[in-house]
Image (cartoon, grey):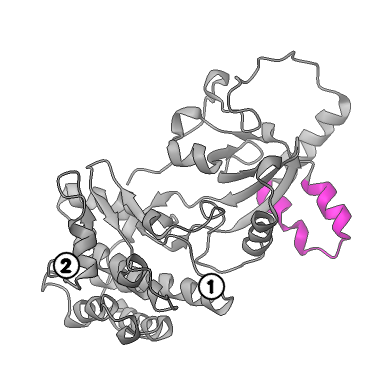
């Protein structure tokens, strides 16, 4: 399975992206010899490594000292290949990068001075304090040239890409793995609910997998600092098919509840079982998916090679009346029980090795 970030072993300067000045090329300024202090700084940071440096916040140190240590980082400690960037990266100031301290893959979320509104900084404070095994880990943040740079760990495999790959290869996901991943997703969504946080624009493109096949939900800070627009909860792939992950009540402008996200969980569960979006918009049929959602039409049936439990769970999640849907807690309990029951029977690879 292809990784979502290309190797940066050579890292030529002419492809390096400057996050502090996106329109400028790296190396365009005067190259000054490094001072002894700079050499010492690089030596210490490389010896410590990013992952261990990120744990300084757990130490019983004064906050000013923690900030000082964190701000020893610089954008020059990260390599961003401009050829890996797309429109979403540029418009949201989110950049996949290679940390040169330990060669780990990370994501940089940049908040320039002009965007540091009170609302945005509240979101930064909120999302950088969340901790869950299935939530993309926040590592560290530092400030440079009045830009807040927030560093997140980066799970190497995108679920959306895995689904497209399996489609091309004519494979399916074993039911045990579906329940395992769905249980992990419900677990992290329940955690966010317990913190009274509604995830912005949840979709398959928000999900990644570790080398061990464990699910990670990307931080809601990455693409959720602007005012929420339910119609952005779509995910276009390279085939021109746009998955629509918007509940009926959101389209109609009705009041939403925590069960609104259960609709999206159902869409994601359906997509893992069928490898196609439950509701899809195409260039030849721009409004068909929206009409089907508003009219309460069910998506195409899931193959009966999957259990009735799986198929009925999808149907329950995709009920038009949000109050008739199960709760996240109910889904979590059921998914964990089903995964546990199927675990002993399954001796295959993780999803990233299918």
What element does badge 2 sit on? loop
The boundaries of the magenta stretch are 50-70
Q: Residue at x 37, y 59 (%)?
A: 203
Q: Is residue 25 above or below residue 134?
A: above
> Which label belongs to residue 173?
none
Mark before the other along the chain sequence, 1 or 2: 1
Q: Is residue 23 left or right of residue 302?
A: right
User: Which residue position holds label 2?
Assistant: 299
Mark 1 vs mark 2, CA separation in Å: 28 Å
Instruction: Please say if the residues under marks 1 and 2 sit with CB atoms less than 8 Å apart.
Output: no
> Which label belongs to residue 192?
1
Q: Does the image show residue 354?
A: no
Quadrant containing the C terminus in the rendered view: bottom left
Q: Which residue is farthest front? A: 253
Q: Is residue 101 above or below residue 118?
A: above
Crowdedness of circle 2 by 10 Å Cα count: few (<14), some, many (20+)? some
Percent position of residue 56, x then y: 77, 57
For the image, the number of numbered tags is 2
């Amino acid at each position: 399975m292809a990784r979502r970030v290309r190797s940066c072993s050579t890292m030529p300067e002419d492809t390096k992206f400057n996050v502090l000045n996106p329109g400028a090329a790296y190396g365009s300024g005067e190259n000054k010899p490094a001072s002894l202090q700079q050499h010492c700084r690089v030596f210490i940071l490389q010896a410590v490594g990013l992952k261990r440096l990120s744990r300084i916040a757990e130490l019983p140190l004064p906050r000013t000292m923690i900030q000082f240590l964190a701000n020893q980082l610089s954008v020059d400690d990260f390599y961003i290949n401009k050829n890996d960037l797309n429109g979403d990266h540029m418009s949201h100031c989110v950049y996949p990068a290679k940390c040169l301290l330990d060669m780990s893959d990370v994501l940089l979320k940049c908040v320039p001075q002009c965007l540091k509104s009170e609302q945005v900084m509240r979101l930064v404070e909120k999302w950088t304090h969340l901790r869950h095994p299935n939530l993309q880990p926040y590592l560290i943040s530092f400030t440079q040239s009045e830009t807040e740079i927030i560093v997140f760990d980066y799970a190497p495999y995108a679920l959306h890409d895995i689904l497209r790959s399996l489609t091309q290869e004519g494979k399916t996901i074993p039911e045990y793995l579906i329940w395992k991943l769905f249980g992990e997703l419900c677990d992290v969504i329940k955690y966010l609910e317990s913190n009274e946080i509604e995830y912005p624009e949840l979709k398959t493109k928000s999900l990644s997998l570790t080398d061990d096949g464990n699910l990670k939900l990307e931080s809601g800070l990455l693409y959720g600092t602007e005012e929420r627009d339910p119609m952005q909860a779509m995910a276009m792939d390279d085939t021109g098919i746009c998955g629509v992950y918007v509940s009926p009540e959101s389209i109609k402008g009705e009041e939403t509840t925590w069960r609104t996200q259960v609709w999206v969980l159902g869409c994601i569960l359906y997509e893992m079982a069928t490898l196609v979006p439950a509701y899809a918009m195409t260039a030849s049929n721009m409004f068909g998916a929206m009409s089907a959602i508003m009219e309460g039409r069910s998506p195409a049936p899931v193959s009966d090679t999957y259990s009735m439990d799986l198929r009925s769970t999808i149907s329950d999640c995709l009920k038009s009346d949000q109050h008739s849907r199960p709760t996240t807690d109910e889904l979590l309990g059921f998914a964990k029980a089903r995964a546990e029951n199927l675990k002993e029977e399954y001796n295959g690879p993780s999803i990233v090795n299918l």
